[in-house]
Amino acid sequence: MNDISRSGFEAAKPVNPDPINPKIRAMEVIDTDFHFTPPWPVIRNYLAEPFKSRIWHYPAVGLEYNPEPANEKPGVGQDSHGTAGTGAEALRVLDQFGSDTVILNPGYNRPMSIFSEPVLAAFCAAHNDYMIKEVFPVSPRLKANMMVCQRNPEMAAAEIRRVGNHSQFVGVFTEFSALYEQIGNARFDPIFDAMRGQDLVLTAHSGGWFNHFSPMFNGARTWVELFGNAPIANAIVHLAAMIMQGLFDKYPKQKVLFQEGGVWWLSDFMLRVDEFYVSAPGDIALTERKLAAGERYLRKLPSEYIMENVRFSTQPITIPKNPKHFGWMLELCRAGDLFCFSTDWPHQTMDAGNWVVEHPGQINEEMQKAILAGNARKLYSRI
Amino acid sequence: MTDFLLCKQDEIQDGKGRAFEAGARTVAVFRVKDKFYAFANKCLHRGASMCDGAIADGGATIRCPWHNWTFHLESGRNVVDPSAALRTFRVRAEGDQLILSV
Ligand code: FES
């Protein structure tokens, strides 16, 4: 025995701490946004001809400046916490974060900027076939949004009809940004026609920043402007199109989950769409769906469609320092009904579930359950 | 204040951290050359384990493994938001052993 241990210090124990709150491990957790990226050789193997023998690499895509290099950490913004491309790899991450069930999103970098629609549709089919043949059989905990060619609504609809009845596909993945026309526009109705009756949720996920050809993009310089805040503006514009152009009047059962577009703007948005609509509903009658239906107005106040048809995944949540303010924000944004937990693993702003259970003064037990799993269970009939 | 015996100095590699349970606390201990730093292991942002973080800025700061919040090793203060500070603890060498005061 050496001098030190004789001197009667208490011994500290070396530990490997689990950063996940034990309460999370005891509760049901559904992760509604997890980026799953099968390796290119696997996808290539599933490509139909002539694509398989003519495409040698996954295309380097992306139309906009990507602000990731502004952050020291390698891979920031994309796969900075790892990569999962097989069912076993995804399950390992679920266990690491205490998630019971996951909805896997196709995780490639902005595939919609592949302009050739047949090439893009071939990638989508290859991805979906890989999910069905090799990923879903690994575990019923693994669900997914199918990948579709958003650029071409008819092609997207054909893919939804081809694979949409697989019970582990729970939704359809689309992206919103200034690069894409609003999916709430009637031009995209073939997608909603194909989804009708299948109980599939439309995922609208942030998919880029501002378009290169926009002065607003050219004026931006920083990661916080582009990565942190542009998606909020984009989400607002895309959600407003869905509501004001009558998407939910034509497809009253269609559910939509917005991802990574922020949440706290909702309280203002709901007031604003209602107030502006009541003051100036005149051009609603001129939207394509309303012209076709011969209707003059929306059937409800705009904010009511949010409560009925739209939900929001939580990552990356922001939390004010004043707990009282946090409580008010949760209430104003109807978090207990509208929020669905997500990690966004493995992207840099990934959230673990800790925040949901570590503010019991603002998020009571009932709301914790709703955010972590209950709201997703209500949203997805296939879970 | 209680003194805890951690481990031998050379059981913590230069530039690396280890976590210890000292009474009710979990403390991350980092080594930068011959200096040792100790602070609360739980990141103030979303609770990542700081012991898995990386030394940055030439040995002046520690960066959280989840979202890069960066804290001065000496003061525990966040480099851009000084109101956010990790609780720091004194760690000293006695012979080849490390002693933590909590
Ligand atoms: S948990 Fe440490 S920076 Fe987010």
Image (cartoon, coloured by chain):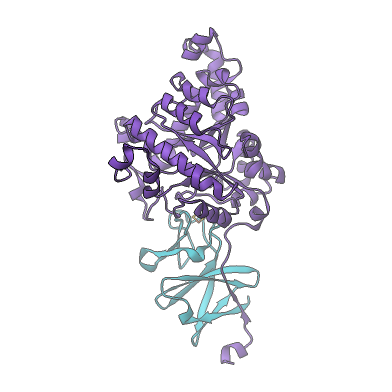
Q: Residue A380: horizontal and vertical position, in percent? A: 61, 35
Query: Residue at 56% of width from left, 24% of height from top?
Result: A196
> The N terminus of chain A appears in which quarter of the rendering?
bottom right
Query: Residue at 62% of width from left, 34% of height from top?
Result: A379
Q: Residue A123: horizontal and vertical position, in percent? A: 38, 38
| Above or below, A290 relative to A350 | above
> The C terminus of chain A appears in which quarter of the rendering?
top right
Q: Residue A83: horizontal and vertical position, in percent? A: 44, 53
Q: Which of the chains is purple?
A: A
In the rendered image, the residue lying farthest to the top is: A294
Q: Which of the chains is cyan?
A: B
| Above or below, B98 relative to A64 | below
Query: Residue at 46% of width from left, 19% of height from top?
Result: A186
Foreground residue among B21 and B34: B21
Residue A351 visible from this viewpoint: yes
Residue A62 visible from this viewpoint: no
